Amino acid sequence: MNEETKVKEPTDSVKSLWHKDTLAEIDYKARAGKHRIRGCATPRRMPNFDDLMILPGQLTRMTIDTYREDCETRTVLGKRFAKKPLVIETPVMIGGMSYGALSKEAKTALAKATSLVGTVISNGEGGILPEELENSYRQSIQVLASRMGFTKRNLEVADMLEFVYGIGAKPGLSGHLMGSKISAEVAELRKLPIGIDLHSHPRSGDSFGADDMIIKMEQMRELTNWEVPIFVKMAAGRVREDIKIAVKLGIDGIILDGCQAGTGAAPVMAADHLGIPTMPALVQAVRTLEEMGVKDEVSLIISGGIRDGADLAKALAIGADAVAIGTSALIAMGCRVCMRCHTGNCSFGIGTQNPEQRKNLDIDEAAERVANYIQAMTAEAVLLAKAAGKSKLKNMEREDLRALTLETAAMTGIPLVGSDLVIGEGFGFTANNKI
Amino acid sequence: MENLDAACYKSSELNEIIKAKMRDGLQDIVIRNSHSMHNMCVGLTGQGNITIEDSTGLYTASFMEGPRVVVEGNVGWYAGDDMMSGELIIKKNTGCNVGAYINGGTIVIYGSTGSRVGYGMKGGSIIVCGNAGRWAAQMSMGGNLIILGELGQQAGESMYKGAVFTRDTNAVNKLGGNVFLDEATPEERVMLKELFDQYEISADPSEFKVIRPATSGRHKYVLFKPVLKPKAAKKFARGGEFRE
């Protein structure tokens, strides 16, 4: 060794518990004396649908021609009690993102996209923007604890109602909208003072518990003449128990939001440490609905980190009837996930109320990109479904799935790849080997 | 005038009958034997006078738009929630959360009411002639809540907009977060007088003060923080006994 060559000391800092981000977190709290707010979703690695593989049809299943044969994607949601269930052309809906968190241009573009592909958009907290209602193919209206911007008029235009008990990005908490985003227009729709930092209340003021909620549901049915499908939107936590209560309320469907879901602003602690991931939450929801004997009656929409046709196909195979997308739709229109949505400073014109920045989003172009994205992810799911031998997307079944890891096998009850090994709670599989 | 026996119907059937009669132009309907039925007069629209000769359960006159509903007895929780317009007159007392999310119209409670009256209210007026429980007008976004009797604790907690009128002499010690006690304006006193005259309430508007939201700017809005009191905890140091 050349004497002049210095031997570099190994540094363990990268592997240390006290890595750069942890130090930065502590520095922030030491300086500010408060918790940190962040946009988008948790950056933590969580189990997801990538840990599942789809089994292709070969000798045991006939495959369907990817390029020449049909595969139905039309989806009916909320047919348990509602006289007019929701019929959409793809099992991909646009989930609730508020006007306030998003610009008027972004909301309008998302609504226009639903008309291009034939699906439904949820308004999110803070009332329904006229431009959204005017452009949406089907409109879901959220009924939230804050009830900001909500009146009886909203019920009259709803194709679907969502009673929101929680969202995956900050379950147990409610809407956060920082003052920089409460513009005069947003404030007017929400009946709020301009520029106030908004922290909504998580408990509803017109139903304190399930017993009241049953009576409230009767009220809603009467007000909507039993026509509009009524869903409950909840964050994934105690899924089994929450689903059982939701079913007993008399709802038509459930939107289950896993902890990989996004938001315009959430305390970092909430996004990173509350709730459970989307995939295992979905399995638990399906198990519960099957236990209760209502799986075919109650529609189940899953959301939280859905990215592509593989996620869609696997979610349907596990037992979802549809998925809801949020962040991925924003990415389709240009978002680069800087995770600074809470600041209201978004040069793409998506997560901002700044008039200059809003000019950067071309509504028609953004709508087309979102529509293309939904079209493409539907086509991807169809490709996988056909390869698995399905002529209807909804015919995807859990028997088409295998788990890549022991962890996923244990969480889902789906056998490990290359074996019949089933671990833990069963999920309808009869296996030779069970641990 | 039409008399209906509520005991013969489910609430949805009864409401349908009332709606049909109002559509036919019937102005006065009297309902007997309500036996604290839930969801009475939900979603009624148009003009009419409905008198309920008994007590009602939850969600009375919710989402109502136009009519005048008088309840001779007591009323359960959530009465008048999301009401759009019209009048809900309650001769006795109510449970909690009356007038939650009300958008417009008037609710008059001649007795006392429970907690969270006017929760998230966005418009209209609620008059409570008796006492009100905790958290009156919590997170309200508009409208006027008028309380003649005693206020509960945390009155006006986190109001965004709107006003709570009170003549409770101890009101200043019962305020929630992000509100302050203010003098009523001459216009507000005129408004109070008109309401008191209209509903035959004996009260002097000049006695009333107003709880208003301190939300004129983002920096004035204060949220919960753990209160750490190192000095108070000192006595537990070095073997001091801890009692919660």
Image: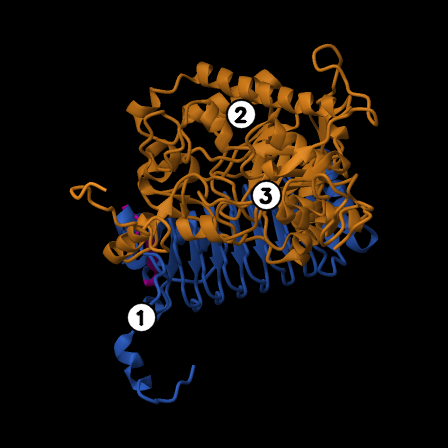
Residue A407 lies, in percent from the top left, at 62, 49
Work out whether residue A5 or residue A11 is closer to the camera in this orientation and state it.
A5
The earlier-in-sequence mark between 2 and 3 is 2
How is the structure coloured here?
by chain
Q: Which residue is mark 3?
A: A278
Label 1 crowding class (10 Å Cα cut-off): few <14, some 14-19, many 20+? few
Work out whether residue B31 or residue A3 is closer to the camera in this orientation and state it.
A3
Q: Which chain is blue?
A: B
- Amino acid type indicated by mark 1: Leu
Q: Quadrant of the N terminus of chain A?
A: top left
> Mark 1 and mark 3 in contact (Cβ < 8 Å)?
no
- Rendering quarter of residue A251: top right
Q: Which residue is mark 2?
A: A133
Whether residue B171 is situated above or below residue B123 in the rendered picture = below
> What residue lies at 43% left-to-right and 38% top-to-bottom?
A40
Secondary structure at badge 3 equals helix
Q: Which residue is mark 1?
A: B228
Secondary structure at badge 1 equals loop
Residue A14 lies, in percent from the top left, at 34, 48
Secondary structure at badge 2 equals helix
Work out whether residue A23 or residue B165 is closer to the camera in this orientation and state it.
A23
Disc 2 sits on a residue from what chain?
Answer: A
Disc 3 sits on a residue from what chain?
Answer: A
Do the residues marked 1 and 2 share a common chain? no
Q: Colour of chain A?
A: orange
Work out whether residue A286 or residue A74 is closer to the camera in this orientation and state it.
A286
Name of the residue lying farthest toward the front: A1
Do the residues marked 2 and 3 share a common chain? yes
Q: Is residue A46 magenta?
A: no
Residue A179 lies, in percent from the top left, at 32, 42
Q: Quadrant of the C terminus of chain A?
A: bottom right
Residue A320 lies, in percent from the top left, at 69, 37
